[in-house]
Structures are given as structure tokens and as C-alpha cells.
Image (tube, rainbow, N blue to C red):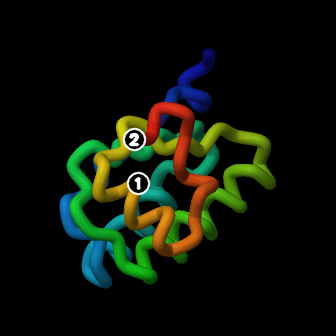
Amino acid sequence: MSGAEKNHVLPLPKVMDRKAARRLASDLLAAKGKPVTLDASHVQRVGGQCLQVMLSAQRSWMADDLPFVVTRPSPLFSQCMRQLGAREFLSGDAP
């Protein structure tokens, strides 16, 4: 794996609100062109704006044929994803 393909791990904040959405969008832009892993282990709440950022990024990464995955989803992250209808962010290891 070359340096340009190094996996970029982004830890998600506990509260994914409007402020977190701006930060997440900025962090994802900085990781553009690299495989990305979102660590959702500490997430307690997800708002619609963060979900929009994640969906948009996921589509961009898919278009670039790069991995974009969510790992270690907390139970509350998984619950929020189910409630928001975003099951694509739930992996086999989701509670």
C-alpha cells in the first residue's frame, strides 16, 4: 500500500451535531483520495447534518473506488442509524 493509499482513521465525537458536522466535513475533505475509517465507538447522538455529511462522503469515496467504512459502532450510534434509516453504516459487528 503506497503512502497515498494509507487508511485515514477519523474518531467520531460523542455528539454529532451541527458543529461536529462542520468539523467532520473538513476532516473528510483533508482525507480525500485516501481510504477512510470512521471510528464510531464513542458516539452517543447523531444529528441529521452529520448523517448528510457521512452519506455524501460515502458516495464520493464509492465514486473514487476507495474504502469508506464505519468501525466499532457504539450501541447508540447503531440505534441512531436505524432510526435515521441509514442502515448502510451498520456493519456485521453492529449491536
Q: Position of residue 94 (x, y in %)?
A: 44, 40
Number of on-image labels: 2
Query: How far across and how far down the image is residue 16, in percent?
Result: 29, 70
Q: Are marks 2 and 1 in contact (CB under 8 Å)?
A: yes
In the image, what residue occupies the spot 53% across and 48% down?
Answer: 90
For the residue carrying disc 1, how many other residues have a C-alpha within 10 Å: few (<14), some (14-19), or many (20+)? many
| Residue 46 in the image: above or below residue 34 | below
Identify the disc placed on residue 95: 2
Mark closest to the chain's N terminus, 2 or 1: 1
- Which picture quadrant has residue 48? bottom left
Dot 2 amino acid type: Pro
Disc 1 residue type? Ser
Residue 70 circle label: none
Q: Give the quadrant of the C terminus.
A: top left
| Cα–Cα gap, marks 2 and 1 | 7 Å
The residue lying toward the viewer, choosing from 47 and 56, is 47
Element under disc 2:
loop
Name the residue rendered at 52%, 64% in the picture.
Answer: 54
Q: Is residue 26 left or right of residue 86?
A: left
* Quadrant of the image containing the N terminus: top right
Residue at 77% x, 49% y: name it.
64
Residue 5 % position (x, y): 60, 29
Q: Give the number of the disc on residue 78.
A: 1
Q: Position of residue 89 (x, y in %)?
A: 55, 52
Q: Is residue 39 above or below residue 47?
A: above
At numbered mark 1, what does the secondary structure look like: helix, strand or loop?
helix
Instruction: Assess disc 2: are there few (<14), some (14-19) or many (≥20) residues with their C-alpha within 10 Å of its C-alpha.
Output: few
**Viewed as shown, does residue 16 lie left or right of 8?**
left
Q: Residue at 36% of width from left, 78% of height from top?
A: 47
Residue 28, placed above or below residue 74: below
